Amino acid sequence: MKRFYFFVLLLVLVLPLLSGCNLSGQSTQDTSAFLTQAAATVIAAQMATAAAASPTPSQTPPPLDTPIPTQTNTPLITATFTPTGPTRTPLTLNTPAAQQPAACDNAAFVADVNYPDFSNIPGGTTFIKTWRLKNLGPCTWTTSYKVVFSYMSDTGKGIISPPGPVNLPKTVKPGEEVDVSVTLTAPTKPEGYRLVFRLQNDKGFFFGPEFWVLFRVPEP
């Protein structure tokens, strides 16, 4: 657009100059006609350029059919339930069995009342060996409980006759102590001997620790 105004201004300035020159009338008219035609051509070209530059409204194509949105299966949001009570543990087939209760009968050795270990007992002598025991179980020992011979050392086999069972002398409640005794006869052969005993309840079961008599028959 600036070039257009500049060209028009140039024509306005040049035409009077051309008219004042010492040219013939025919030449002046020809020159004026030429310039006028050129100016018209420039104006027409400028207008065409401006028209081409200006945007023309375009026809908006008719809208196509609007697609129907497909329905999706959106999962519903549900509230999370939190139990407030105690948790229940499901039962299993491998549940361990309940722990067995403590044994009814149990005992502890307290002391040798007489004839401590390695005592010398002359051959052929009859003596009474006594031990002190304590009831460590929850059950009461009755007089049906016994002191029973268990086994002896190899040196006494075939020489010493094992003593028979001896009943407890009294009822022994849990936590109480009792002295139990057996009668023995020392063999005549000089040697060391050991005889081992156990407690037996009224049902015939052994319980508690082993206790023994350990002695020597000296040379005569």
Image (cartoon, rainbow, N blue to C red):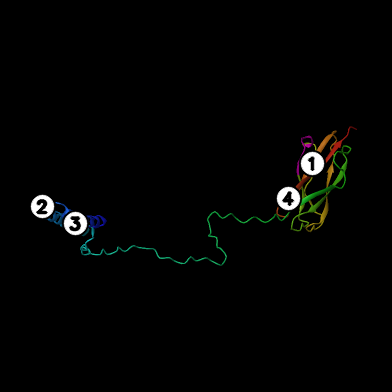
Q: In the image, residue 105 lies at what x, y percent?
A: 73, 54
Mark 2 lies on residue: 24
Mark 4 lies on residue: 207
Q: Nearer the viewer, mark 4 or mark 1?
A: 4
User: Is residue 163 rendered magenta in the image?
Assistant: no
In this rendering, position of residue 183 left or right of residue 56: right
Between the C-alphas of marks 4 and 2, the distance is: 161 Å
Q: Residue at x 76, y 47 (%)?
A: 209
Between the C-alphas of marks 1 and 2, the distance is: 173 Å
Query: Which class describes the residues within 10 Å of circle 1: few (<14), some (14-19), or many (20+)?
Result: some
Between 173 and 11, the residue placed more toward the observer is 11
Q: Secondary structure at mark 4?
A: strand
Range of magenta residues = 150-156
**Residue 161 shows in this picture:** no
User: Is residue 154 rendered magenta in the image?
Assistant: yes
Mark 3 lies on residue: 16
**Residue 192 shows in this picture:** yes
Between 162 and 155, the residue placed more toward the observer is 155
- Label 1 with label 2: CB-CB less than 8 Å: no
Q: In the image, residue 169 lies at what x, y percent?
A: 82, 55
